[in-house]
Image: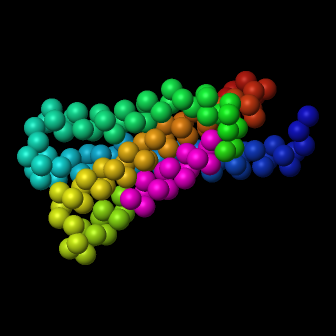
Protein backbone atom coordinates (compact mmCIF):
# COMPACT_ATOMS: atom_id res chain seq x y z
CA UNK A 1 0.00 0.00 0.00
CA UNK A 2 1.32 3.38 -0.94
CA UNK A 3 0.69 6.49 1.08
CA UNK A 4 -1.04 9.50 -0.40
CA UNK A 5 2.30 11.37 -0.46
CA UNK A 6 4.01 8.59 -2.41
CA UNK A 7 1.15 8.49 -4.88
CA UNK A 8 1.35 12.25 -5.47
CA UNK A 9 5.12 11.99 -5.86
CA UNK A 10 4.68 9.30 -8.52
CA UNK A 11 2.29 11.51 -10.48
CA UNK A 12 4.72 14.40 -10.21
CA UNK A 13 7.66 12.30 -11.46
CA UNK A 14 5.50 10.80 -14.20
CA UNK A 15 4.51 14.28 -15.36
CA UNK A 16 8.18 15.29 -15.79
CA UNK A 17 9.11 11.98 -17.43
CA UNK A 18 6.31 12.44 -19.96
CA UNK A 19 7.26 16.07 -20.53
CA UNK A 20 10.82 15.00 -21.29
CA UNK A 21 9.53 12.24 -23.54
CA UNK A 22 7.22 14.57 -25.49
CA UNK A 23 10.04 17.11 -25.84
CA UNK A 24 12.33 14.41 -27.19
CA UNK A 25 9.67 13.29 -29.63
CA UNK A 26 9.25 16.84 -30.91
CA UNK A 27 13.00 17.17 -31.50
CA UNK A 28 13.38 13.86 -33.30
CA UNK A 29 10.17 14.19 -35.33
CA UNK A 30 10.61 17.77 -36.49
CA UNK A 31 13.16 17.11 -39.21
CA UNK A 32 10.96 18.90 -41.72
CA UNK A 33 12.36 22.18 -40.35
CA UNK A 34 15.69 21.45 -42.09
CA UNK A 35 14.35 19.48 -45.06
CA UNK A 36 14.60 22.31 -47.60
CA UNK A 37 18.15 23.24 -46.51
CA UNK A 38 19.31 19.60 -46.52
CA UNK A 39 17.93 18.90 -49.99
CA UNK A 40 19.34 22.09 -51.52
CA UNK A 41 22.73 22.11 -49.77
CA UNK A 42 23.59 18.50 -50.48
CA UNK A 43 21.77 18.39 -53.83
CA UNK A 44 19.71 15.44 -52.63
CA UNK A 45 16.72 13.89 -54.29
CA UNK A 46 13.59 13.39 -52.22
CA UNK A 47 14.38 9.67 -52.04
CA UNK A 48 17.89 10.29 -50.72
CA UNK A 49 16.57 12.71 -48.11
CA UNK A 50 13.98 10.12 -47.05
CA UNK A 51 16.75 7.53 -46.69
CA UNK A 52 18.90 9.76 -44.47
CA UNK A 53 15.91 10.76 -42.38
CA UNK A 54 15.00 7.09 -41.98
CA UNK A 55 18.48 6.43 -40.59
CA UNK A 56 17.85 9.02 -37.85
CA UNK A 57 14.47 7.48 -37.01
CA UNK A 58 15.95 3.99 -37.28
CA UNK A 59 18.36 4.76 -34.44
CA UNK A 60 15.40 5.33 -32.13
CA UNK A 61 13.72 2.11 -33.22
CA UNK A 62 16.82 -0.12 -33.30
CA UNK A 63 17.99 0.75 -29.81
CA UNK A 64 14.53 -0.20 -28.50
CA UNK A 65 15.48 -3.84 -29.11
CA UNK A 66 18.02 -3.63 -26.31
CA UNK A 67 16.03 -1.66 -23.75
CA UNK A 68 14.63 -4.69 -21.86
CA UNK A 69 18.22 -5.89 -21.43
CA UNK A 70 19.30 -2.43 -20.24
CA UNK A 71 16.43 -2.25 -17.76
CA UNK A 72 17.25 -5.73 -16.47
CA UNK A 73 20.99 -4.99 -16.06
CA UNK A 74 20.96 -1.30 -15.13
CA UNK A 75 17.55 -0.87 -13.52
CA UNK A 76 14.72 1.37 -14.65
CA UNK A 77 16.04 4.53 -12.99
CA UNK A 78 19.58 4.19 -14.40
CA UNK A 79 18.27 3.32 -17.87
CA UNK A 80 16.07 6.41 -17.93
CA UNK A 81 18.98 8.51 -16.66
CA UNK A 82 21.14 7.13 -19.49
CA UNK A 83 18.40 8.04 -21.98
CA UNK A 84 18.10 11.55 -20.56
CA UNK A 85 21.85 12.04 -20.83
CA UNK A 86 21.80 10.83 -24.45
CA UNK A 87 19.04 13.31 -25.30
CA UNK A 88 20.93 16.12 -23.54
CA UNK A 89 24.16 15.31 -25.39
CA UNK A 90 22.21 15.25 -28.64
CA UNK A 91 20.80 18.70 -27.96
CA UNK A 92 24.25 20.05 -27.14
CA UNK A 93 25.72 18.62 -30.37
CA UNK A 94 22.78 20.00 -32.35
CA UNK A 95 23.19 23.46 -30.81
CA UNK A 96 26.95 23.44 -31.44
CA UNK A 97 26.23 22.88 -35.12
CA UNK A 98 23.96 25.93 -35.15
CA UNK A 99 26.36 28.02 -33.03
CA UNK A 100 29.44 27.36 -35.16
CA UNK A 101 27.50 28.02 -38.35
CA UNK A 102 26.26 31.34 -36.93
CA UNK A 103 29.86 32.23 -35.98
CA UNK A 104 31.07 31.46 -39.48
CA UNK A 105 33.31 28.64 -38.25
CA UNK A 106 31.36 25.94 -40.12
CA UNK A 107 29.86 25.96 -43.56
CA UNK A 108 26.18 25.19 -43.81
CA UNK A 109 26.86 21.67 -45.05
CA UNK A 110 29.22 20.94 -42.13
CA UNK A 111 26.73 22.50 -39.73
CA UNK A 112 23.93 20.28 -40.97
CA UNK A 113 26.10 17.17 -40.58
CA UNK A 114 26.77 18.15 -36.95
CA UNK A 115 23.07 18.84 -36.41
CA UNK A 116 22.11 15.46 -37.86
CA UNK A 117 24.69 13.77 -35.60
CA UNK A 118 23.04 15.42 -32.62
CA UNK A 119 19.66 14.19 -33.78
CA UNK A 120 20.99 10.62 -33.81
CA UNK A 121 21.85 10.92 -30.10
CA UNK A 122 18.40 12.40 -29.49
CA UNK A 123 16.88 9.46 -31.37
CA UNK A 124 18.76 6.91 -29.29
CA UNK A 125 17.69 8.56 -26.03
CA UNK A 126 14.13 8.96 -27.28
CA UNK A 127 13.88 5.28 -28.18
CA UNK A 128 14.95 4.30 -24.70
CA UNK A 129 12.72 6.87 -22.99
CA UNK A 130 9.61 5.62 -24.76
CA UNK A 131 10.00 2.22 -23.18
CA UNK A 132 11.16 3.37 -19.75
CA UNK A 133 8.25 5.80 -19.38
CA UNK A 134 5.73 3.14 -20.40
CA UNK A 135 7.38 0.63 -18.04
CA UNK A 136 7.22 3.16 -15.20
CA UNK A 137 3.52 3.74 -15.84
CA UNK A 138 2.94 0.00 -15.91
CA UNK A 139 4.72 -0.62 -12.61
CA UNK A 140 3.45 2.38 -10.68
CA UNK A 141 -0.15 2.50 -11.85
CA UNK A 142 -1.02 -1.13 -12.52
CA UNK A 143 -4.10 -1.02 -10.26
CA UNK A 144 -5.66 1.96 -12.10
CA UNK A 145 -8.04 0.61 -14.74
CA UNK A 146 -8.37 3.89 -16.62
CA UNK A 147 -4.67 4.05 -17.48
Residue 106, given in percent of the width and then of the height, sits at 21, 67
Residue 47, given in percent of the width and then of the height, sits at 15, 32
Q: Quadrant of residue 133?
A: top right
Q: 96 or 11: which is nearer to us?
A: 96
Residue 124, given in percent of the width and then of the height, sits at 46, 41
Q: 142 or 126: which is nearer to us?
A: 126
- Residue found at x 58% / y 47%: 82
Task: State the quadrant of the N terminus.
Answer: top right
Residue farthest along the bottom direction in this orientation: 103
Q: Is residue 115 left or right of residue 13?
A: left
- Residue found at x 31% / y 69%: 99
Q: Is residue 36 visible?
A: no
Q: Answer whether residue 90 is magenta in the image.
A: yes
From which residue to which does the magenta span run? Answer: 79-93
Q: Main secondary structure of the magenta part?
A: helix
Would you place residue 138 above or below residue 89 in this image? above
- Residue found at x 25% / y 53%: 113
Q: Is residue 56 visible?
A: yes
Q: Answer whether residue 88 is magenta in the image.
A: yes
Q: Is residue 138 left or right of residue 122?
A: right
Q: Is residue 22 left or right of residue 37?
A: right
Q: 19 or 57: which is nearer to us?
A: 57
Q: Quadrant of residue 71?
A: top right
Q: Is residue 75 left or right of residue 62?
A: right
Would you place residue 34 above or below residue 111 in this image? above
Task: State the quadrant of the C terminus.
Answer: top right
- Residue found at x 75% / y 44%: 10
Q: 49 or 36: which is nearer to us?
A: 49
Residue 105, given in percent of the width and then of the height, sits at 23, 72
Amino acid sequence: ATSRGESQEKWYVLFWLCTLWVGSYHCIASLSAVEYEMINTFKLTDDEYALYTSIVFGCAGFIALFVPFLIHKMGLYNTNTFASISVTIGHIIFLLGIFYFANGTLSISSSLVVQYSGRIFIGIGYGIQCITVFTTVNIWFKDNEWL
